[in-house]
């Protein structure tokens, strides 16, 4: 009987193999190659540029001494340019104009009614509105915290504060800070605007970025690095010609609204490139290795990624904490997706990988969000659009935030997201909202305990524009009740001859490097008017989350072996392919068990002849 059984078994095996082998081959082919098939080039190394650029190293005291010798190149009050998200009329989604508010997708967690955000440990006034003739809107409220100092970098001024007392240790105009790079027409510091500053724990330095010149061929990327953790001392500064692509060709496009990130290897600067007729052309990224910036070299090397595959408008580079396999760039996708691009080989020649799509709760992408009300005045405050405003990469997750319209009203609120860039999935997300108050211009930070903090502006029909904040504990996945940083003091209406009541364009929320637990935030508020003219002010505040509540007990019994396999459908990119491949590997044991049981059933079957034979 044995030979007959073997003969019968072989008659089952051969047809089975003829069926299963092609299916397995097709499955593996789709897993490995399916996502990239037909998508065109998905990577780019950009162009390497090495050259001597405008460079200077000087202390703040030296800057102050030289400032009177320089002719002020920007007389009068200034309204800084704002380019709305380019969306063709009548379209929706990634390239569209605002559409009707859509229902929110799940999962999404709204603000928690309790407990409240932590109380302030300390708060004090930041830099304020400059005098008439030197006024500027918006201030571009931006700040960073170091071991012992706070740095504020606005469109008007550079300032340094004592963290303990709030005392102003240094203050000079923004143009004076950059002035040694040249303030004449066409020179880097002729028209500085759009300021960013970050403290880098890996190098123990402050990094500052500002744009210069709102037209081509006079557009510049200005970079400054403090020589020590003390920002009152010396700074080294460089200027890179922004409209000269690959140091070869100028296309008469100039840089606007930078997205700035850091990791252990590089400084990343993203910018929207506009023509001199203010039409968006493409996105561009500069990757500048940090070692040469820390060694005060006037000859520097950087990589330029001009319009890399899949790039888009308003890309934001992540501020990366700790070791990471790659640097990530985030920007808006469709009404229910964000786009996440990856730059790897960050210690060598950087390689750009085309973005994947990450599904989020639906919102209405908008080029112009509704203006926020304020009491006693008809003028509303400009809340800009739905662009992402900053990104933090920590403990394997990306955190980002932006202003969106409430799904059921015209009111604006804050949307935040925690994303796993490896799988292209949303780990958590939520909205920060209020029944009557409008929120706008958020910023986000994350501490060592994986607690996120968000700071933003807010106003209502009964509240002047002020600063607010809250925290998001990983154990709850929801924003706690919002707390007040600084109440607004008066109605705010300031156009400086323009057509919009400008506010923002962003704010600052950062973790304190001293304990990597507490947070500092710098927000804008409406100050009392001076001589009948509206004034903006900025306000610093520090708070500590405290010990987080214990995590909820694990569901189910046993050793945590339960759960299910989730394969994210992320649109395109390598995360989806790797997920399919991983799913195939995980399913192999189950397939083997099924095959074994299949043959055992056939051995017991009566009659012996199987329908497959």
Image (spheres, rainbow, N blue to C red):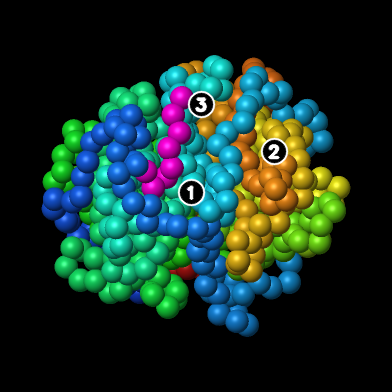
The answer to if 172 sits in the magenta stretch is: yes
Q: Residue 168 carries which label?
A: 3
x then y, percent, for residue 164: 54, 17
For the point 74% across and 33% down, the residue is 483
- Give the number of the mark in front: 2 or 1: 1
Is disc 1 surrounded by few (<14), some (14 to 19) or many (20+) residues within 10 Å?
Answer: many
Is disc 3 surrounded by few (<14), some (14 to 19) or many (20+) residues within 10 Å?
Answer: some
Q: Main secondary structure of the magenta part?
A: strand
For the point 62% across and 75% down, the residue is 97
Q: Name the residue under label 1.
A: 155
Magenta range is 168-176
Q: How far apart are marks 1 and 3 (CA)?
A: 18 Å
Of the two numbered discs 2 and 1 on the same chain, state the one appearing first in sequence.
Answer: 1
Tags 2 and 1 touching, CB below 8 Å: no
Q: In this view, does 365 lie above or below 451?
A: below
Q: In which quarter of the image is residue 474?
A: top right
- Give the number of the mark in front: 3 or 2: 3
Of the two numbered discs 3 and 2 on the same chain, state the one appearing first in sequence.
Answer: 3
Q: Which of 372 and 181 is in front in this view?
A: 181
Quadrant where the C terminus sits is: bottom left
Most extreme residue toward the bottom, as rendered?
90
Of the two numbered discs 1 and 3 on the same chain, state the one appearing first in sequence.
Answer: 1
Q: Residue 172 carries which label?
A: none
Q: Which of 210 and 434 is in front in this view?
A: 210
Q: Assign a secondary structure to mark 1.
A: loop
Q: Name the residue under label 2.
A: 468
x then y, percent, for residue 408: 81, 61
Q: Can residue 202 be seen in this view?
A: no
Q: Can residue 54 be seen in this view?
A: yes
């Amino acid at each position: 009987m044995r030979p007959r059984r073997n003969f019968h078994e072989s008659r089952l095996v051969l047809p089975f193999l003829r069926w299963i082998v092609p299916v397995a081959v097709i499955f593996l082919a789709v897993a490995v190659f399916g996502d990239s098939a037909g998508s065109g080039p998905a990577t780019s190394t950009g162009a390497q540029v090495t050259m001597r650029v405008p460079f200077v190293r000087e202390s703040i005291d030296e800057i102050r001494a030289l400032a009177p010798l320089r002719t002020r190149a920007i007389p009068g009050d200034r309204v800084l340019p704002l380019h709305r998200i380019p969306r063709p009329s009548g379209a929706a989604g990634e390239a569209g104009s605002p559409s009707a508010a859509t229902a929110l997708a799940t999962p999404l967690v709204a603000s928690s009614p309790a407990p409240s955000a932590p109380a302030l440990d300390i708060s004090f006034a930041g830099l304020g509105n400059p005098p008439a003739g030197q006024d500027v809107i918006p201030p571009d409220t931006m700040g960073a915290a170091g071991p012992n100092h706070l740095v504020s970098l606005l469109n008007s001024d550079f300032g340094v504060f004592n963290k303990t007392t709030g005392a102003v240790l240094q203050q000079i105009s923004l143009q004076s800070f950059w002035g040694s790079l040249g303030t004449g027409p066409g020179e880097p510091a002729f028209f500085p605007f759009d300021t960013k500053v970050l403290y880098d724990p890996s190098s123990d330095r402050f990094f500052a970025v500002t744009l210069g010149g709102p037209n081509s061929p006079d557009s510049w990327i200005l970079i400054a690095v403090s020589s020590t953790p003390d920002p009152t001392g010396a700074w080294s500064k460089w200027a890179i010609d922004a409209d000269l692509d690959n140091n070869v060709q100028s296309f008469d496009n100039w840089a606007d609204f930078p997205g700035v990130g850091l990791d252990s290897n590089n400084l990343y600067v993203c910018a929207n490139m506009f023509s001199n007729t203010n039409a968006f052309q493409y996105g561009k990224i500069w990757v500048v290795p940090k070692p040469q910036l820390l060694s005060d070299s006037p000859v520097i090397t950087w990589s330029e990624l001009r319009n890399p595959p899949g790039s888009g408008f308003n890309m934001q580079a992540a501020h990366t904490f700790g070791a990471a396999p790659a640097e990530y760039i985030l920007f808006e996708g469709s009404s229910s997706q964000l786009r996440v691009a990856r730059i790897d080989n960050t210690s060598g020649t950087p390689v750009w990988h085309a973005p994947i799509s990450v599904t989020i709760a639906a919102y209405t992408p908008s080029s112009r969000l509704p203006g926020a009300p304020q009491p006693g005045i008809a003028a509303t405050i400009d809340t800009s659009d739905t662009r992402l405003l900053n990104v933090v990469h920590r403990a394997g997750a990306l955190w980002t935030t932006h202003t969106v319209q409430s799904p059921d009203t015209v009111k604006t609120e804050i949307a935040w997201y925690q994303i796993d860039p490896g799988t292209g999935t949303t780990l958590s997300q939520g909205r920060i909202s209020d029944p009557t108050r409008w929120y706008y211009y958020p910023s986000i930070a994350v501490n060592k305990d994986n607690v996120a903090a968000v700071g933003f502006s807010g106003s209502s029909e009964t509240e002047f524009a002020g600063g607010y904040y809250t925290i998001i504990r990983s154990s709850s996945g929801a924003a706690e009740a919002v707390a007040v940083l600084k109440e607004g003091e008066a109605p705010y209406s300031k156009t400086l001859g323009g057509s919009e009541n400008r506010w923002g364009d962003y704010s600052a929320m950062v973790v304190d490097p001293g304990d990597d637990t507490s947070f500092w935030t710098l927000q804008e508020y409406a100050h009392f008017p001076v001589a009948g003219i509206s004034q903006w002010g900025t306000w610093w505040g520090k708070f500590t989350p405290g010990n987080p509540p214990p995590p909820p007990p694990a569901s189910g019994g046993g050793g945590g072996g339960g759960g299910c396999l989730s394969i994210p459908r992320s649109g395109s990119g390598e995360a989806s392919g790797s997920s399919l491949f991983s799913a195939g590997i995980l399913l192999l044991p189950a397939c083997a068990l099924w095959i074994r049981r299949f043959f055992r059933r056939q051995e017991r079957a009566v009659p012996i002849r199987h329908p497959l034979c």
